[in-house]
Image (cartoon, rainbow, N blue to C red):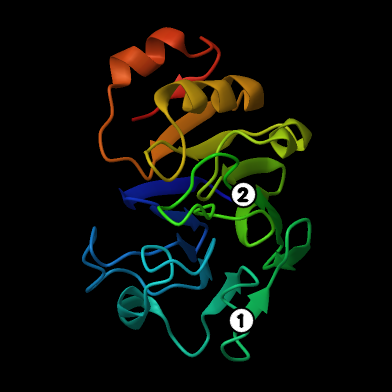
Amino acid sequence: MGDLRVKVLGHASVRLDIGDKIIYVDPYSEVHDFTGDPKADLILITHNHYDHYDEKAFSEIETPDTTFIVSANVGPVDDRYIVLANDQFCTWEGIQITAVESYNVNRRNPSGELFHPRGVGNGYVVDFDGFKVYLAGDTEPIPEMQELPKIDLAFLPKNLPYTMTDEEFLKAANLIKPKCLYAYHYFEIDVPKLKKDLDPAIELLN
């Protein structure tokens, strides 16, 4: 498929370029100006929170031919939208995209509700002809991570109160054991501290 080029845009926004295809994940206009950026062939949306489903960002990068792959709580907005529930998959331009579980176990809002209930949002495993990229979405360490295939590149969230502490981030990373790892969706990061307790076989790219 050619070289995979990765650009971390801020918060949970990522761009993946493969061949002549441009894929955006959770584009978010408050952390990146999408004006003039390449148009999207595919946009992956993990869930419907405003910092993940951002129509202002879409307006700069979508075309009538852009495909959206979204979680069930986004839904089928128009005929460009493919809705995947957890454990469902589809193939787009020869790339297999699998929706995996992404949810909170402990993190709750002031009303006592989980920020991200089970079965609502998606993480994604994007399989580029055997090279697998895991985009975890807003999640804590969850048992389903043990069932992931061998991951080459992972994006794991690291922020409170919504996702993981540093310790939980390391727990998830050391469980999944990707070859390469990005922390994303964070407010602050201490890279030397994380590297100190990270499995030495994992390359932290932040």
Which residue of the protein is positioned furthest toward the front in this rendering? 111
User: Quick one: 100 or 40, which is closer to the camera?
Assistant: 100
64 lies above or below 176? below
Residue 182 visible (yes or no): yes
* Direction from residue 130 to residue 48 in the image, left or right: left
Q: Position of residue 131 (x, y in %)?
A: 65, 41
> Which residue is located at x 61 percent, y 49 percent?
102
Residue indicated by mark 2: 102
Amino acid at pointer 1: Tyr
Quadrant in the picture for the C terminus: top left
Amino acid at pointer 2: Ser
Q: Position of residue 72 (x, y in %)?
A: 65, 72
Q: Dot 1 surroundings within 10 Å: few (below 14), some, or many (20 or more)?
A: some
Name which quarter of the figure residue 52 lies in: bottom left
Instruction: Give the Cα distance between marks 2 and 1.
Output: 20 Å
Dot 2 falls on a residue whose secondary structure is strand
195 lies above or below 11? above
**Of marks 2 and 1, the one in the foreground:** 2
> Which residue is located at x 75 percent, y 36 percent?
149
Name which quarter of the figure residue 204 lies in: top left
Dot 1 falls on a residue whose secondary structure is strand
Residue indicated by mark 1: 81
* Direction from residue 143 to residue 66 in the image, left or right: left
